[in-house]
Image: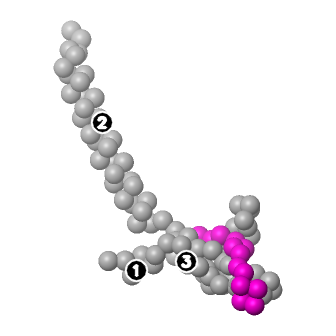
Amino acid sequence: MGIGPHENAEADLAYASAAAALLAEAAELAAETAPRRYSVCALDVEAEDGAVLAWGLAFPGRAVLCKLDGRPAGTFVSAESSMRMLRRRGEVRLIWIDPDPCSAS
């Protein structure tokens, strides 16, 4: 005898429920472990101008900096240290895009 339509529907519902629960758990884990985004910006106070020079991702113990076109610019020990390579362009600042997870309530 084959499996009746009700048994397939119950199995499908159980599978969909388990998949949804696992997806929610994966999304929570991704949010908890995501790198913190930042930018390195140039400031010209006299000209009242500024520009984004690069984008970064800060991980525990390292940071990855990317050029505006998405090509990698380097890996550094911290977001702050990644600014050093861009300081030759004048005054630069690190701008955090994501809040500090340690200060979140």
Label the magenta part by its dominant secondary structure.
strand
Which residue is rendered at x = 30% and y = 36% of the image? 16
Which of the image's four quarters has the N terminus? top left
Residue 87 can be seen in this image: no
Residue sitting nearer the eye, 5 or 97: 97
User: Mark 2 vs mark 3: which is more N-terminal?
Assistant: 2
Which residue is rendered at x = 63% and y = 71% of the image? 56
Answer few, some or many: residues within 10 Å of disc 1's Cα (few below 14, many 20 plus, some between 14 and 19). few
Which residue is rendered at x = 39% and y = 55% of the image? 27
| Badge 3 vs badge 1, beta-carbon distance below 8 Å | no
Instruction: Determine if the magenta segment contains residue 20.
Output: no
| Badge 1 vs badge 2, beta-carbon distance below 8 Å | no
**Residue 84, picture quadrant:** bottom right
**Residue 96, picture quadrant:** bottom right
Give me the disc on residue 16.
2
Q: What residue type is labelled 1?
A: Cys
User: Mark 3 vs mark 1: which is more N-terminal?
Assistant: 3
Q: List the residue tagged with mark 1.
A: 102
- 7 is higher (above) or lower (below) than 41: above
| Badge 2 vs badge 3, beta-carbon distance below 8 Å | no
User: Could you tell me how far apart the alpha carbons at marks 3 and 1 are, in whole angstroms?
Assistant: 14 Å
- Colour convention: one colour
Q: Give the range drawn in magenta.
A: 44-59
* Residue closest to the far bottom: 46
Q: List the residue tagged with mark 3.
A: 96
Give me the disc on residue 44.
none
Q: What residue type is labelled 3?
A: Trp
Instruction: Determine if the magenta segment contains residue 49.
Output: yes
Which of the image's four quarters has the C terminus? bottom left
Q: Is residue 60 left or right of residue 69?
A: left
Which residue is rendered at x = 69% and y = 73% of the image? 52
